[in-house]
Image (cartoon, rainbow, N blue to C red):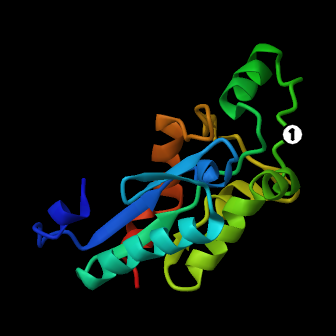
């Protein structure tokens, strides 16, 4: 929904923004800026994202950014399915260290955003004691491509109390 449309809906109080954010730091990506295609530039990306968040804030809408779930470059959803097929003998290798290495630029970007705006980190719940969970209480957390599965999203929504995270000050 374009920001111009959001402005005309007075009942909107919160805007939840999420993305894998990785494409903003890929050499293969470009940005469309004022009808011109430009190469990815980290400073430009940060400036435009902050402008979006500031615009929402000026409209009286609280922006909340959800960091992407931890990933390490593997298709975690496929890995989890393979671990079931091979009776758990498949190691997905999703550790806090592999996540932090693979997602270094995204994490740095969101840490900068977090200086002014609320960022919800999936890694706070999924990563601990040297491992990032891919399945919890029998629920597959991941789909593919760094996305949560539908069931995983519902599970984390309840476990992390997304509503409270969004609406709390």
Relative height, residue 58 to residue 18 (above, below): below
Place residue 97 in its image quadrant. Answer: bottom right
Relative height, residue 12 to residue 157 (above, below): below
Count of marks, rendered view: 1
Relative height, residue 87 to residue 155 (above, below): above
Counting from the top left corner in percent of width and height, residue 44 is at: 56, 68
Looking at the rendered structure, the secondary structure element under dot 1 is loop
Residue drawn at 61 percent across, 37 percent down: 142
Residue drawn at 24 percent across, 74 percent down: 13
Counting from the top left corner in percent of width and height, residue 95 is at: 84, 50
Counting from the top left corner in percent of width and height, residue 128 is at: 79, 60
**The one of 78 and 136 positioned closer to us in this rendering:** 78
**The one of 5 and 39 positioned closer to us in this rendering:** 39
Place residue 82 in its image quadrant. Answer: top right
Residue drawn at 63 percent across, 35 percent down: 138
Q: Residue furthest top?
A: 85
Residue drawn at 79 percent across, 23 percent down: 83
Place residue 169 in its image quadrant. Answer: bottom left
Q: Say which residue label 1 marks.
A: 93
**The one of 119 and 110 positioned closer to us in this rendering:** 110
Q: Residue furthest front?
A: 36
Q: Residues within 10 Å of mark 1 (few under 14, many from 20)?
A: some
Relative to 88, 139 lies left or right: left
Counting from the top left corner in percent of width and height, residue 124 is at: 67, 64
Relative to 51, 152 lies left or right: right
């Amino acid at each position: 929904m374009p920001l111009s449309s959001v402005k005309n809906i007075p009942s909107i109080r919160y805007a939840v923004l999420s993305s894998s954010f990785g494409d903003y730091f890929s050499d293969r990506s470009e940005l469309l800026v004022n009808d011109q295609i430009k190469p990815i530039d980290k400073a430009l990306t940060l400036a435009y994202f902050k402008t979006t968040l500031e615009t929402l804030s000026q409209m009286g809408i609280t922006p909340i950014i959800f960091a992407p779930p931890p990933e390490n470059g593997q298709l975690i959803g496929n890995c989890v399915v393979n671990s079931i097929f091979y009776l758990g003998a498949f190691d997905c290798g999703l550790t806090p260290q592999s996540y932090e290495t693979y997602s270094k630029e995204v994490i740095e970007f969101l840490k900068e955003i977090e200086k002014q705006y609320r960022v919800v980190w999936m890694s706070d719940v999924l990563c601990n004691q040297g491992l990032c969970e891919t399945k919890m209480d029998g629920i597959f957390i991941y789909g593919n491509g760094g996305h949560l599965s539908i069931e995983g999203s519902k599970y984390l929504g309840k476990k992390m109390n997304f509503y409270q995270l969004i609406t709390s000050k």
